[in-house]
Image: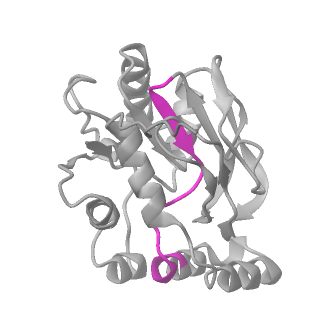
Amino acid sequence: IGILICGRFTGRPLEVAGGDYDRVYTEIFTAADPEVDIRFYYAVEGDLPESPDECDGWIIGGSRTSVTADEPWLDDLMDFIRAAASAEARMVGLCFGHQAIAHALGGTVGKATAWTTSVQPLILKQQPWFPGGLIPLQAMHEDTVTKLPEGAKIAGYGTSCNVPAFMIGEHIFAIQYHPEIGADLAEVLIDRIGDELTPTARSRALASLETPTGRLKMAQWILRFLNDQREKSVHH
């Protein structure tokens, strides 16, 4: 599985995570499947795969950068997403990655009225790779998908976000949330956002960290999707 790193931790989040984004992705996905083989590409530094078939599937990760920012590495990332989509390579987007896939393929992304930083009650629709249902996950976003690309279908609901999850065909799955972020890391990231949150929003976000999340289950479902491991049909 190829994971495209689209941001960097600095300061306290780096200390609490015990490393950068590659560390938190490795921890959650190896917990989901100890046999998983992960290769990292630092897209934020211009390091991208030469071809969409270089790995069996792709994960586009999180970032503090907006997908609409004027940064050269973003143009290259969008080109890769379009190439991967054209090749029908299996691809998952997480938060920024969710927005990047939508933006690259003709959807639109815009700034919300405020940050969403709390655990959100995502309800995923049943898919061939996982049963769906309620799976609370950590949110950490200011931008949201405001219009889906052509051919995309909403794949989840129940959160404060209009497009919490979507799918395109059977090769693209994107969610607005962060299975890689646990409560300790979420707490310092909420503090990092700091003045951009109202006192009420900050209190609500910190209180929500007591809600157990389904981050490990979500990581397992993502890997099932990327490996095209379908649920066995149940006959009555």
Residue placed at 75% from the left, 51% from the top? 161
Q: Does the magenta stretch include residue 101?
A: no
Q: For the C terminus, which image quadrant?
A: top right
Above or below residue 44? Residue 205 is: below
**Quarter of the figure with residue 115:** bottom right
Query: Horizontal and vertical percent for residue 103?
Result: 58, 30
Q: For the N terminus, which image quadrant?
A: top left
Query: Horizontal and vertical percent for residue 214?
Result: 53, 66
Residue 186 is left or right of residue 112, and the answer is left
Which stretch appears magenta?
170-186
Residue placed at 48% from the left, 30% from the top? 172
Above or below residue 165? Residue 30 is: below
* Viewer-nearest residue: 31 or 163: 31
Residue placed at 28% from the left, 38% from the top? 46
**Quarter of the figure with residue 107:** top right
**Quarter of the figure with residue 31:** bottom left
Extreme residue toward the front, this view: 236
Residue placed at 28% from the left, 24% from the top? 52
Residue 169 is left or right of residue 55, and the answer is right
